[in-house]
Image (tube, rainbow, N blue to C red):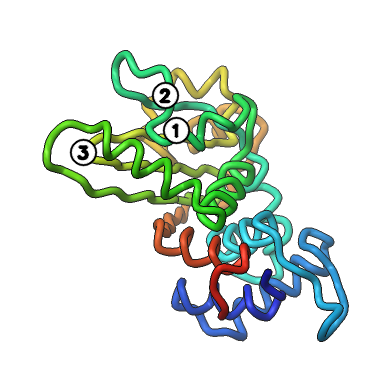
Amino acid sequence: MASPGDLVAAVAAVLGYPLVTISTYYRHLREAGLVTKGGRGPSAAQMSPRDAALLLLAVAASDEAKTAAERTLAMGLIPLVYRSRERGQETSLLSVFDDLPASHTFADALTMLLDCAGQGSLQSAINATLSSTEGSVKVWNIRVTILGPLPQARIDIFVGGRHEMLSYSSIPSELFSEFDPGEGLDALKNWSSETEHSFPGDMSFTREFTNRTILRIGALVAGKVKQ
């Protein structure tokens, strides 16, 4: 298991941020009651996959640490609104995604990825898909994308030359089908201008991290590696 200090140090290292920056983000999450609390030393809190997921969301979704709690909640609670699969495919490329309920949120999906990475079931699912894939392409990648300022996110799964995408958005699911998912923030801006939802400025951002972060942080939280 990992302490808060371990998690902060690992996230800073894998994302390439100063340690003090990630520590400040974590402090704001703790003060808002969004991560597990504990004492110091032997009584320090033990970080869960959910804690790790929320810290990653805070860093990716917030330009300032003081808005971390608010932005983490806004980003974490957006629901799954679109899922692309190959024609005729009824199950996910990776079996671990089939365990998520249809109504899951982005934070649920990221928590699951970190948990499965730490337990080894993510790699097992990847190996199973690669072994059943025809052809010589035996590589894989998972990319997590966070877009703002209105909350939107995407998880792209690439395994053996095949691709699946899960999109999460603050656009109501009944409206999302009217937009090309590739339009991204343009769809969010159009929706915002036609409703009472105010779009907080025209400056958008996109941030990404990959399976490198997922595997590293997942293993740390599971106690498989030390910081």
Q: At which x and y percent is residue 26?
A: 70, 72
* In the image: residue 140, left or right of residue 201: left
Q: Say above or below: 79 vs 59.
A: above
Determine which quarter of the picture holds residue 79.
top right
Circle 2 sits on which residue?
A: 179
* In the image: residue 169, left or right of residue 83: right
Other-residue count near label 2 (Cα within 10 Å), few / some / many at <14 / 14–19 / ≥20: some
Of the 4 image quadrants, the one containing the C terminus is: bottom right
What's the distance in space between the residues labelled 3 and 2, CA to CA? 26 Å
Tell me, for residue 161, which label it has, or none: 3
Dots 1 and 2: beta carbons under 8 Å?
Answer: yes
Q: Say above or below: 185 vs 101.
A: below
Label 2 secondary element? loop
Q: Nearer the viewer, residue 72 or 205?
A: 72
What's the distance in space between the residues labelled 3 and 1, CA to CA? 29 Å
Amino acid carrying mark 2 in the image: Phe
Q: Say above or below: 85 vs 1.
A: above
Q: Residue at x 53, y 27 (%)?
A: 81
Amino acid carrying mark 1 in the image: Ala
Label 1 secondary element? helix
Q: Nearer the viewer, residue 215 or 157?
A: 215
For the view shown, which residue lies furthest in the top direction? 88
Q: Which of the two marks, 3 or 2, is nearer to us in this view?
A: 3
Q: At which x and y percent is residue 117?
A: 51, 54
Circle 1 sits on which residue?
A: 187
Whichever of callouts 3 and 2 sits on the residue coming sooner in the sequence is: 3
Q: Nearer the viewer, residue 204 or 43?
A: 43
Whichever of callouts 3 and 1 sits on the residue coming sooner in the sequence is: 3
Q: At which x and y percent is residue 113?
A: 53, 48
